[in-house]
Image (cartoon, rainbow, N blue to C red):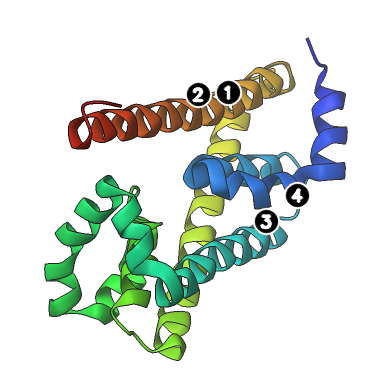
Amino acid sequence: MLAVSDFETLAQNAGYLMVAFGILIEGEVTMTLGGFAARRGYLDPILIAIVGAAAAIAHDQIAFWLGRRTGRAQLAKRPKLKLRAERLEPLLHRSRYLLAFGFRFIPGTRLVTPLLLGISGVRPALFTACNAAACILWAATYTTIGFVFGAAAERWLHEAERYEGPLLIIGASAAAIIWAYRTYRRHRRRRLTTRLIDPTN
């Protein structure tokens, strides 16, 4: 098993990069673990929040511009994504401002919502302003949760250093398992949809 010093070295050398890529796998878990690492003194909490917010903004901007350019084609190729977009349309018509701000806090909508907003012709400046504000708040919130969790762990565990390694392993493993499970379900549903559309496949 890796020693605590190994985690410290890994966090200090690649912690911010891990946060940036972790956003694409499981954002909340990644930011919470980043806040925990900051509490342990491995990383700077402000930099973690900045990196997390920047990665989230980049992800959402790419999806938004993809929606403006080829969004309808993307939905046509992905029936499940199209169904999610159709469910979001009533909210889009009621308040696109609220949707542009709020989707970052709703798991399962972070790809389809910016696509839909891009398709619907929302002004780029409006989307960028709402999305940036949401991502900054989201990143700061989950970094703080991780930081507070780290403080609680220090109070509750008299031998915290013995447990922080396993805690980080459990957190990282949980993120990987969730990502793998969601990927499996996505591919399985896609295969089932294809078979329903074309039984000869």
Closer to viewer: mark 3 or mark 4: 4
Residue at horizontal 71 percent and vertical 44 percent from the top: 18
Residue 184 in the image: state x and y as whole percent.
42, 26
Residue plotted at (46% across, 61% down): 138
Q: Earlier in the sequence, mark 4 or mark 2?
A: 4
Q: Residues within 10 Å of mark 1 (few under 14, many from 20)?
A: few
The image position of residue 125, as x and y in percent, is 46, 90
Identity of the amino acid at label 2?
Ile
Q: Is 21 on the left or on the right of 140, as rendered?
A: right
Badge 2, how many Cα within 10 Å: few under 14, some, many 20+? some
- Residue ID at (75%, 55%): 44
Q: Which is more foreground, mark 2 or mark 3?
A: 2
- Residue tagged by mark 1? 173
Whether residue 22 is visible here, answered yes or no, is yes
Q: Residues within 10 Å of mark 3 (few under 14, many from 20)?
A: many
- Is there a contact, CB below 8 Å, between mark 1 and mark 3? no
Q: What is the CA distance from the residue labelled 3 to the residue labelled 4?
A: 10 Å
* Structural distance between the alpha carbons of marks 1 and 4: 17 Å
The residue identified by callout 2 is 177
CA gap, disc 2 to disc 3?
23 Å
Question: How far apart are the two marked residues, 4 and 2, measured between alpha carbons?
Answer: 20 Å
Q: Which residue is mark 3?
A: 48
Which tag, 3 or 4, sits closer to the chain's start? 4
The amino acid at mark 1 is: Ser
Of marks 1 and 3, which one's residue comes earlier in the chain? Answer: 3
Q: Kindly check if marks 3 and 4 are in contact, taking CB atoms under 8 A apart as contact.
A: no
What mark, if any, has residue 17 been given in the picture? 4
Q: Answer left or right for 80 relative to 172.
A: left
CB of mark 1 within 8 Å of CB of mark 2?
Answer: yes
The amino acid marked with disc number 4 is Leu
Labels 2 & 3 near each other (Cβ < 8 A): no
